[in-house]
């Protein structure tokens, strides 16, 4: 084995324990969060989001085991009573796309953009080091540990010979990401962690999700395939049809034998025919077919409209896309036109997704910040789809659901509102309807549940569904006096308003604190994990030495700590701002 290639975390991960009790390293009480016989959430403002159940200015929610058994005023029950007066009791928030392993890279590329090949013009820089972009920093340095040489494809200018992360770092990132989301009221997340370099990495990430106690869809995603160069780094994504010992089949058999569990199986699945990772031969089935064979929800990036048209043109992918969630969905319009999405903007891609029953996940903050293209709320709404919301990556932006809802709410309204002014709308385009606060909440709950394949289980406070519930403190200095419930949630609230969180009937967050977790140790350990990864990046490499980036201020490489980490080089055609305060 070549120097620097070892990746093992020997003794760290026991596959038999993946669905078992949380890690003893971080739990202060192994019994914390256990399900009691009955819990009665008493006297809160209840926002059920279920039209048949209704909403109540004052009501109770009765929980038995994992399930909601009743919602309404003045419920009587022999139960543990939790006083919810002065709070809003509502379904937990649900996000549908998050690269959780990147939590180790929080704020690493906050000023950087994601350079995409569409469009290609003089104002779009190339994603080539020393330009620090999401592509070069996250997807080349920190994830695979390899930087290609554009002048000589296949010959890297720097290569560690292994990913800088260990499986342990992936485990910690997953665990911290999920627990952090719980503190913000996110009870369900779809994790698209593109770090399945070897089975050990994949297993560690799954264990982090199971241990967290959060509900999640693990969307099995590719990592870096080094198996041809280093046989000690086996690669199995995506697996093969009929094989339960390898890739997706192994995961389905080992961890996801039951749908009646908190963590369920998804797949970042190619719509094209699968290339077998061992034989390198193209198979006669697509990635979507493989995902469906093993019961995995399909969760795919879909960066432009042609991609969706290609998905639909492959007959093996079928015409029922109810198990498909497409992410980002930018630049789907048929003709070059500003993506304000009024009714005269046509899109065959949106028509396909609508007609086939597919779901859309929009990451409003990241898409605006990273140059994905305009977040496509208006087109999504025009084609009759309520989109779900997602954070995407914490290397650039928060996962906070209140920020996501406000981003969606203000962006759609800003673009629509600007059309009422002749100076902004010389062509007299029609002004679309404005989204309401309640509709944005439904994006973060009902649409999230549908896009996670879980609407029959969660997303509304409906008797018979599982009790994924967030209790929001509305009697606070930043929200009182409250005059409108949905408006308070979307326009005023923050993470500090999250008082309690229940997942499948377990109290996992109570009075503003995670239940049973040693948070200080988690924070110490994830900082140490980051330091180990950075030290490895600056350590011995198989090829070259990592050169300094445009925004890095030290050599060996270190992300810019006190100044911009992605400003220099991203725009070479416009002059620098000359500003006065």
Image (cartoon, rainbow, N blue to C red):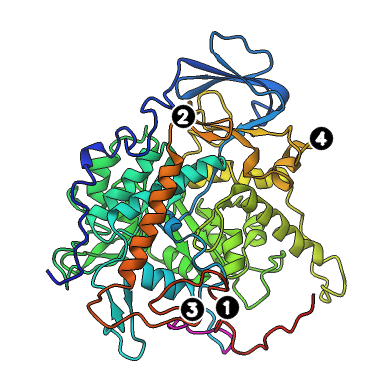
Instruction: Assign a secondary structure to mark 2.
Output: loop
Q: CA distance from mark 3 to mark 2?
A: 47 Å
- Front one among 198 and 53: 198
Residue 434 sits in quarter: bottom right
Where 180 sits versus 72, above or below?
below
> Decide: marks 4, 1 in contact (CB < 8 A)?
no
Disc 1 from disc 3: Cα separation: 13 Å
Q: Main secondary structure of the magenta part?
A: loop
Whole-number angstrom distance, CA of label 2 to CA of label 4: 32 Å
How far apart, in angstroms, are the residues tagged by discs 1 and 2?
A: 44 Å
Check disc 2 and report the residue beneath it. 504
Which residue, given by chain and number where applicable, does mark 1 sit on? 567
Question: On the rendered structure, is 330 left or right of 212?
Answer: right
Which quarter of the figure is the C terminus placed in? bottom right
Give me the disc on residue 553.
Answer: 3
- Front tag of 2 and 4: 4
Q: Earlier in the sequence, mark 4 or mark 1?
A: 4
Q: Earlier in the sequence, mark 2 or mark 4?
A: 4
Is residue 153 in sight in this rendering?
yes
Label 4: state its secondary structure. loop
Give the residue number, with chain letter if any, for mark 4.
Answer: 481
Distance CA(mark 4)–CA(mark 1): 42 Å
Q: Quadrant of residue 370?
A: bottom right
For residue 161, side relative to residue 90 (left or right): left
- Which residues are drawn in magenta? 122-132
């Amino acid at each position: 084995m070549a120097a620097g290639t070892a990746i093992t975390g020997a003794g760290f991960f026991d596959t038999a324990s993946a669905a078992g009790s949380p890690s003893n390293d971080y739990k202060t009480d192994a019994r914390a969060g256990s399900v009691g016989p009955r819990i009665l959430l008493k006297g809160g403002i209840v926002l059920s989001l279920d039209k048949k159940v209704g909403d109540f200015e004052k009501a109770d929610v009765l929980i038995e085991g994992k399930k909601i058994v009743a919602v309404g005023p003045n419920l009587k029950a022999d139960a543990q009573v939790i006083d919810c007066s002065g709070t809003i009791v509502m379904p937990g928030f649900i996000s549908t796309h998050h690269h959780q392993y990147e939590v180790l890279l929080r704020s690493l590329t906050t000023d950087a953009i994601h350079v995409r090949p569409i469009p290609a013009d003089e104002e779009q820089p190339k994603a080539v080091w020393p330009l620090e972009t999401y592509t070069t920093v996250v997807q080349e340095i920190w994830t695979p540990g390899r930087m290609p040489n554009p002048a000589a494809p296949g010959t890297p200018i720097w290569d560690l010979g292994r990913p800088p992360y260990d499986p342990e770092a992936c485990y910690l990132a997953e665990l911290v990401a999920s627990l952090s989301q719980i503190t913000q009221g996110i009870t369900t997340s779809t994790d698209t962690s593109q770090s399945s370099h070897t089975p050990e990495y994949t297993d560690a990430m799954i264990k982090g999700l199971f241990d967290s106690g959060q509900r999640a869809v693990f969307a099995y995603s590719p990592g870096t395939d080094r198996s041809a160069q280093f046989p000690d780094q086996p690669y199995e994504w995506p697996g093969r049809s009929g094989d339960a010992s390898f890739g997706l089949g192994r995961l389905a058999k080992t961890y996801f034998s039951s749908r009646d569990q908190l963590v369920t199986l998804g797949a970042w699945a190619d719509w094209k025919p699968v290339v077998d990772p061992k034989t390198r031969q193209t198979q006669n089935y697509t990635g979507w077919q493989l995902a469906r064979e093993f019961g995995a929800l399909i969760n795919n990036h879909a960066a432009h409209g042609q991609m969706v048209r290609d998905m639909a043109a492959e007959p093996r992918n079928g015409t029922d896309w109810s198990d498909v969630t497409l992410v980002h969905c930018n630049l789907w319009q048929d003709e070059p036109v500003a993506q304000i999405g009024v009714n005269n903007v046509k899109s065959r891609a949106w028509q396909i997704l609508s007609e086939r029953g597919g779901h859309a996940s929009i990451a409003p903050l990241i898409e605006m910040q990273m140059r994905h293209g305009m977040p496509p709320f208006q087109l999504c709404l025009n084609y009759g789809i309520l989109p779900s919301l997602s954070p995407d990556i914490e290397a650039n932006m928060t996962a906070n659901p209140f920020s996501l809802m406000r981003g969606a709410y203000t962006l759609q309204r800003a673009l629509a509102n600007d059309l009422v002014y002749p100076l902004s709308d010389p062509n007299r385009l029609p002004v679309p309807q404005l989204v309401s606060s309640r509709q944005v909440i439904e994006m973060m709950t009902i649409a999230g549940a549908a896009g996670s394949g879980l609407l029959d289980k969660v997303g509304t406070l409906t008797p018979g569904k599982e009790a994924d519930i967030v209790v929001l403190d509305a009697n606070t200095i930043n929200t009182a006096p409250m005059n409108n419930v949905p408006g308070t949630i979307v326009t005023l609230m923050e993470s500090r308003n999250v008082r309690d969180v229940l997942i499948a009937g377990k109290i996992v967050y109570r009075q503003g604190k995670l239940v049973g977790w040693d948070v200080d140790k988690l924070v110490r350990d994830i900082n140490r994990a980051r330091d180990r990864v950075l030290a490895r990046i600056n350590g011995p490499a198989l090829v070259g030495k990592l050169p300094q980036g445009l925004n890095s201020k030290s050599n060996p490489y270190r992300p810019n700590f006190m100044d911009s980490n992605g400003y220099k080089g991203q725009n070479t055609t416009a002059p620098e701002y000359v500003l006065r305060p």
